[in-house]
Image (cartoon, rainbow, N blue to C red):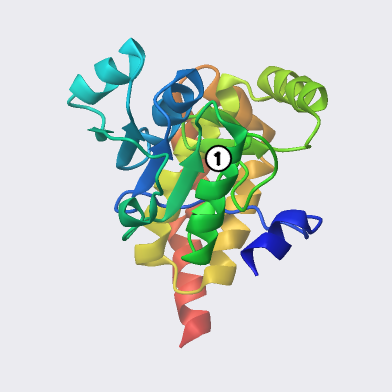
Amino acid sequence: MAEQRNHQSPGPRLPLFLDLTARMVVIFGGGAVGERKARLFSQYGPVRVFSRDFTSGIQELAKDPQKQVELVACDISAGVGRYLQDVFIAIPATSDSNLNRAIEAEARAMNILVNNVEGIGDVVVPSILQRGRIVVAISTEIPALTKHLRLRLEEELTDSYQEMARLLYQIRRENKETIATQKDRACILWEILSDEEVWRLLSVSYEKAYMRARSHVSLDERDSLDAGDT
């Protein structure tokens, strides 16, 4: 069954944001590709790298107390099944394509997600653009187009969007304690987003923008909303 999946065309893919805090990601190969993957995934959760040798970069990562990178020196050419227990994502990243395919087959036989560094696997890592609370993931399967879109979005996502995200997060958290229904809370947030004066003030003072945003949730409005729910 695993071999059939390797030759099938990839199906439609669902973009997801995953919490990897307690999910183990294992990388097979301690070279340049393995290092790049370790740097990425160790930002989000624990990473274990299996290889006979490791780049100096991976070794430095393993020493960093802010990262959860564990190095295991071993020979993986004889099989990796014993290293795949309780693993969420496996990444075959050796310099041997045949070995990578063998590792992928073992992982899939154990129903483990695979990030394929030589093709399209179960897990595709997008280009990630982050501005505070705003995270945009881009994937087109065409690197040049992906880069083009990222550059365009970097121009569009100015500091005002980051501050607006911060503002809406604060207002939304406060409204959960005072506004009973999700529909009414969403309506208030849309009013704030549509208020050009809030956007203008964000470039001047966060506090002034916040006060303007709060005007959309006056005490009279709260009372009327509460009365409507009773």
In the shown orientation, is residue 109 left or right of residue 194?
left
In the shown orientation, is residue 91 left or right of residue 98?
left
Compared to residue 16, the image places residue 185 above or below, namely below
Horizontal and vertical percent for residue 20? 38, 49
Along the line of sight, the residue nearer the viewer: 191 or 131: 131
Residue drawn at x 51%, y 42% is 213
The residue beneath circle 1 is 100
Horizontal and vertical percent for residue 218? 47, 55
Residue drawn at x 54%, y 34% is 164
- The outermost residue toward the top is 56
Q: Can residue 110 be seen in the rendering of this structure? A: yes
- The outermost residue toward the front is 78
- Label 1 is placed on what type of residue? Asn
Residue drawn at x 31%, y 55% is 82
Horizontal and vertical percent for residue 57? 34, 14
Compared to residue 151, the image places residue 121 above or below, namely below
Along the line of sight, the residue nearer the viewer: 118 or 127: 118
Q: Can residue 207 be seen in the rendering of this structure? A: no
Horizontal and vertical percent for residue 145? 82, 26
In the shown orientation, is residue 224 left or right of residue 29?
right
Query: Mark 1 packing: few (<14 Cα in 10 Å), some, or many (20+)?
Result: many
Q: Secondary structure at mark 1?
A: helix
Compared to residue 113, the image places residue 72 above or below, namely above
In the shown orientation, is residue 140 left or right of residue 87?
right
- Residue 157 lies in quadrant: top right
**Tag count:** 1
